[in-house]
Image (cartoon, rainbow, N blue to C red):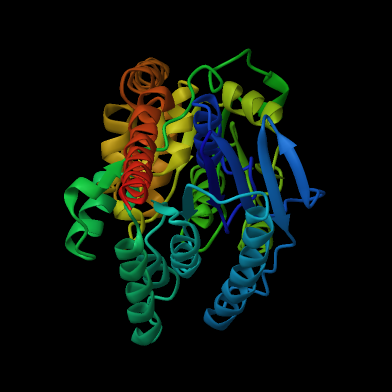
Amino acid sequence: MSRILIIVQNLPVPFDRRVWLECQALTAAGHQVTVVCPKGKDDPAYEVVEAVQLLKYRPYAPGGSKFSFVAEYLYSFAATARLTLKARRSGRFDILQACNPPDIFWPLARVLRTLDRTKFVFDHHDLCPELYESRFPTGPRLPYLGLRALERRTHRTADHVIATNESYRDIAITRSGKSPADVTVVRTGPNPEFLRRGPARPELRRGRKFLAAYIGVMGPQDGVDIVIRAAHVIVHEQGRTDIAFTLIGSGDCFDELVRLRDELDLTDHVHFTGRAPDELVGQILSTADVGLSPDPKNPLNDVSTMNKTMEYMAFELPVVAFDLHETRVSAGDAAVYAEPNDVHDYARAIVALMDDEERRALLGKLGRERVEGQLAWSLQERAYLGVYERLLGRNRQTAASERAAKEQV
């Protein structure tokens, strides 16, 4: 049995759906998996969930400035290093998988490689340099260059890089010089058996005819403010009071978004759930008529895969999105695309889709078929497990060679 350590900084597990799917795939393949991550609300410091050991530290998020990110990441690195050493007391790890953001855990990989010959897999979730550009478009250049250096060091330290799409794979190869053979695309495909449309709950429309839903993180680069501004156009400029908006999730901008809703007199039309349990999420997405992917076009979003888009498709929801490169790769014909960053065009696309029941049904069907035939996690996990089989095979060959050399001596 191989021992695997997975490091996550930006979300707790199993709340991080991608990482949890990876954990389940590894345990089903017979590996022992330990995760180091921040705590969620009311999480214990240690627990075992479905055979996965979870070691968690108290999160520290002092704010959204450039300097607060540095403080947060230094704290997270120290907390992660402490729990990594604690987990290692039970024995060496065969593979360390670090998920970003941030790109700061390569020194731990080097230490474990020196001590235990541990292999390093980098699971590349976000482009940190582009994330900085998107959050601080007029910020100084030095932090961007620093993030590029950390990204390059992480890529080059890794024995193998897992990229969430072809755009990220190209960056690992062209920007960091990784060999194409050492970069594998593993999309964050939804599990269509778990994510599927169920019975509608009409009361979730809150007395309206239609329901538009958003699920995801609410940060500066996620465009949730665009949903609220589009709702203002729909309700107060177009006079359409038959559409309810439900926004699921939380993030750095949550309080600011609630204030924006109230300032635009949308309290009766836009409802925030905060982070919601899976049961409620399923009920909302099973009741909704469209799924909202308002991510604006910026250096990060244009080349990033949006998990929410594929989750909408799994629930047979037509998607309203801006015309971004990787969003088109994911959704194809299952979405309608508005002019990037144009609030009025986004509002127009929502209303047009609400008023065309036949098109909504067609796009929902196309989305579900696309998930089942191309994007489902069951299709992605083959590539994911293939990375581990390759690296563990190398470990076994190295160990066998060392034993043979000792026997000759």
Position of residue 296 measured from the top left corner of the image (x, y, whole percent): 38, 56
Question: In this orientation, which residue lies closer to the viewer: 409 or 196?
Answer: 409
- Quadrant in the picture for residue 114: bottom left
Residue at the front extreme of this rendering: 409
Q: Is residue 150 above or below residue 284?
A: below
Position of residue 290 measured from the top left corner of the image (x, y, whole percent): 48, 30
Left or right: 377 with respect to 217? left
Question: In this orientation, which residue lies closer to the viewer: 229 or 321?
Answer: 321
Query: What's the residue at 51%, 49% (across, down)?
Result: 227
Question: In this orientation, which residue lies closer to the viewer: 321 or 398?
Answer: 398
Is residue 90 visible in the rendered image? The answer is: yes
Left or right: 51 with respect to 313? right
Query: What's the residue at 62%, 63% (across, down)?
Result: 80
Count of numbered labels shown in the rendering: 0
Left or right: 193 with respect to 160? right
Is residue 341 visible in the rendered image? The answer is: no
Position of residue 149 measured from the top left corner of the image (x, y, whole percent): 33, 76
Query: What's the residue at 75%, 62% (across, down)?
Result: 58
Position of residue 116 measured from the top left corner of the image (x, y, whole percent): 49, 57
